[in-house]
Amino acid sequence: MKSTKSSILLLLVLFLSIQIHAQSINKENKLIYYADEFENGKFLKDFMLIGPFPNLQPEGTGTYYFHLEHTCLGFSKDYLASIGGEENMKPFIGQTVGYESGKSLKWEKIHSPTDKIDLKKTFTPNDKVVCYAAIYINSDKAQEKLMGIGSNDGMKVWLNGEMLIKIHVPRTVNIDDEYLKLKLNKGENLLLIKIECI
């Protein structure tokens, strides 16, 4: 059943909390967080974001839209292929991503004043679309961090090109729908999240 809030896409990240000035933009225009400044129990509020990309149904499916691979085409499509793909790209603020017959979008930095990122207010169109959020995490050693995350609706999460989770269900957003162990390498780590809005 489609939730009453399905047109509002919210992303929550808990347990990767940072102090107010603990993220920065480096000379390559990458949004960087520092693992040694994470603090439990608070939210990340700054991300690199790109979208919206179409998440359309194939012709002939009518109004049926129930989070299946064959009815949500954008959820399974790699829209980042022009910059190396979902598993290999290295995004930065201002980077252009080409898709579908000459169309393009750019990565932008966004800041949420609340603990939720409301993508309905960020994007137009904001229905039957997908978007990507990304951050870099710099770590001075190999270590593990715990991340809680929730989404409305489906999402995929990659760390350094390895998919950690794939959720493709209709739901409202809740704090800590899932917990993920982030096995950080020493140095730069890329966290990529693909989020679905219907």
Image: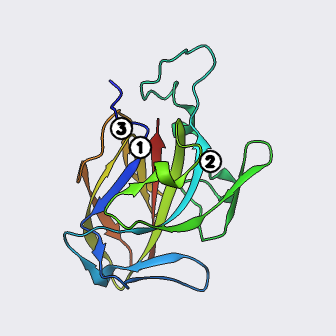
Residue extending farthest to the left is 41
The answer to whether the residue labelled 3 contacts the one labelled 1, judged by CB atoms less than 8 Å apart, is yes
Asked where in the image residue 53 lies, by quadrant, the reply is top right
Q: At 56% across and 36% down in the image, what residue appears?
A: 55
* Separation of marks 2 and 3 at Cα, in angstroms: 25 Å
Residue under label 1, please give it.
8
Between circles 2 and 3, the one closer to the viewer is: 3
The numbered dot on residue 79 is 2
Pick whichever of labels 2 and 3 is earlier in the sequence. Answer: 3
| Most foreground residue, 32 or 189 | 32
- Crowding at label 3, few (<14), some or many (≥20) Cα neighbours within 10 Å? some
3D distance between C-alphas at marks 2 and 1: 21 Å
Taking depth in this image into account, of 177 and 88 the one nearest to the observer is 177
Residue picked out by circle 3: 5
Residue at 24% in and 67% down: 15
User: As displayed, is residue 155 above or below residue 40?
Assistant: above
